[in-house]
Amino acid sequence: MKPIIKDTCHEPDSASFDLRPVEGKEADQELASLTKALGHPARIQILRLLARRQSCICGEIVDEIDGLAQSTVSQHLKVLKEAGLIKGEIEGTAVCYCIEPRGLRRLKVLVAGI
Amino acid sequence: MKPIIKDTCHEPDSASFDLRPVEGKEADQELASLTKALGHPARIQILRLLARRQSCICGEIVDEIDGLAQSTVSQHLKVLKEAGLIKGEIEGTAVCYCIEPRGLRRLKVLVAGI
DNA sequence: TGCATATATCGTATTTATACGATATAGTAG
DNA sequence: CTACTATATCGTATAAATACGATATATGCA
């Protein structure tokens, strides 16, 4: 019997999300939220860490980041999650973080469209 | 005799600027600075305003932005300028703002490279 | 059940951002 | 030179971000 593999990092994305306008007041607000979430070196580092690997990362993140306390890293993860750039799922005793491809793609589209 | 036309918005850019690394600690810091500068709706709006037109804008900017006071808009302009995303030159009694193409391009490259 | 581990949340101190009115500065026109 | 205009800077009030230690929560394992 094959194990059930749940690839939550790469589920299909809704087209409607991608096809929203890339300018106008709402797009400005959206881009501001996304870039504000990115506007800290530790969060850039986290995002790259997750983007580089194809898989999610369960734990390890705190160890990889500068000299920040665990609670601080957790706070940064929350900011990225609320911005829709990453997502986290509880996976046993750890939490498994990975990129939210829609959010990252949306960011890239909006920035490219400036 | 022809007039001297000084197109300060489109001067040639140094290649060395563009060819810096797109990841690593320095790039993280650089991208964080750029995105932090973008992380406000009014600043996005300003940047788009300048990017849309090929020319610089002398004055007018305050009128175009939401309902923010002149001093507040000036402050936002300063943030964008310090981030290297726009530049301003005194042009008579007004100040002529325009996109800093290198900075914007660098931002796009760094975001695309995440 | 109770302990150990991983992560989140809370409380809090400090710093930084945002916004405004008031004022300074600098160029233009008269 | 004076008045006018456009923009920047200052002072300041308020809000938000950052960081930490302490603590809560939830899961897996003995």
Image (spheres, coloured by chain):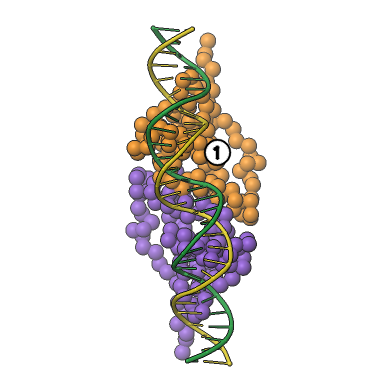
Chain colours: A orange, B purple, C yellow, D green
Is A80 drawn above or below residue B91 in the view shown? Answer: above
Out of C8 and B91, give the one closest to the viewer: C8
Q: Which quarter of the rendering shows the C terminus of chain A? A: bottom right
Q: Position of residue C18 (x, y in %)?
A: 54, 55
Q: Is residue A63 left or right of residue A26?
A: left
Tell me if residue C5 comes above or below residue D15 in the rendering. above
- For the point 65% across and 41% down, the residue is A16
Name the spot of residue B30 as percent of width and height, x first: 39, 51
- Report the residue marked by disc 1: A82
Compared across the picture, whether A16 is left or right of C8 comes to: right
Please identify the quarter of the rendering in which residue B105 is found.
bottom left
Judge the density around disc 1: few (<14), some (14-19), many (≥20) Cα neighbours within 10 Å.
some
Q: Position of residue D19 (x, y in %)?
A: 39, 40
Q: Is residue B48 visible?
A: no
What's the chain of the residue with tag 1?
Answer: A
Q: Residue at the spot x=35%, y=44% of the render? A: B24
* Viewer-proximal residue among C22 and B92: C22
Task: Identify whether B24 is placed above or below B83.
Answer: above
> How far across and down, in percent of the image, does residue A68 sit?
37, 37
Amino acid type at circle 1 is Glu
Seen at 42% across and 69% down, the residue is B11
Q: Note whether residue A38 is visible.
A: yes
Nearest the viewer among B95 and B3 is B95
Q: Check disc 1 and report its element: helix, strand or loop.
A: helix
Q: A62 or C3, which is in the foreground?
A: C3
- Point 48% across, 32% down: residue: A98
